[in-house]
Amino acid sequence: MAILQLRAPNLMAHPTSEPDSYVELHRIFCVGRNYAEHAREMGNDAADPPFFFMKPASAAVRTGASIPYPPATQDFHHEAELCVLIGREGADVPRADALSFVWGYAAGNDLTRRDLQAAAKAARRPWDMAKGFDKSAIIGDIHPVAEVGHPDNARITCTVDGALRQDASTADMIWPVADIIAYLSGLVTLQPGDLIMTGTPAGVGPLTKGQTCVVEIAGLSPATVTIAP
């Protein structure tokens, strides 16, 4: 796993739970509609098989940051997610071996310009500008598997200014982590530093200027962001 370690942080470096330790992010893959209740609240059926969209690695923001309200939207949403960091290269990975490719886990927040996403859906256009804009991926410290194991039944919550918005378990995912890795590795060759955001439970909602949003997953560091006034 040493290939992921950096001596000093740079634009794509993200801190781990270990002191003065960073990993370099390569790509960010996001799973759509991986919780049935969220799919229903958005007026959709659950995805079968899973589908993916991407954010640039440069969209990642460390927990505790303050970010500006993004341009070109009047409907800016939070989405609490379990994030999976890939630790070694793999293609066509069997499901039985998939978890051995995981370096670690983090709490994350897939920030979304919901109005742009709705317009893109209506026009049957890509979601890139709704999902992949600047500072759109808030990522907590990444915990190695050796420290936290595999959080396959962990409580996942999102609060906004202390008010609970999302509350579910990672066990509610339609496609568990092993399934996601196996399927995605049949589409692309996974690389060290790839980060997978595994989908969000029901309860997504708007963020406004001045609010603080906290995503927490049992056993992991929180992913916290404040929207600048």
Image: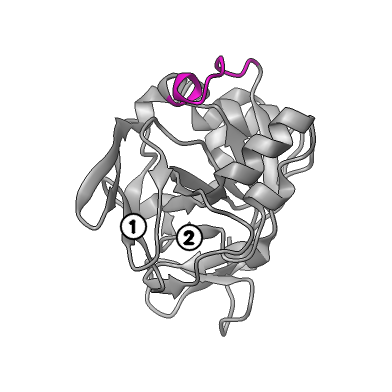
How does the figure colour the protein chain or chains? one colour
Q: Residue furthest bottom?
A: 8
Task: Measuring from the top left, give residue 203's x and y in whole percent.
Answer: 36, 34
Does 83 sit above or below residue 2? Answer: above
Q: Position of residue 226 (x, y in %)?
A: 37, 68
Left or right for 166, reference 34 = left
Q: Is residue 50 above or below residue 151?
A: above
User: Residue 163: x percent and y percent?
Assistant: 20, 48
Identity of the residue drawn at 40% across and 54% down: 207
The three-letter code of the residue at mark 1 reads: Cys
Q: Position of residue 130 (x, y in %)?
A: 65, 48
Q: Who's the residue at 72% across and 29% down the image?
A: 122
> Which stretch is magenta?
38-48
**Side (left or right) of 132 relative to 114:** right
User: On the image, numbered disc 2 is attached to which residue?
Assistant: 138
In reply to whether residue 42 is colored magenta, the answer given is yes
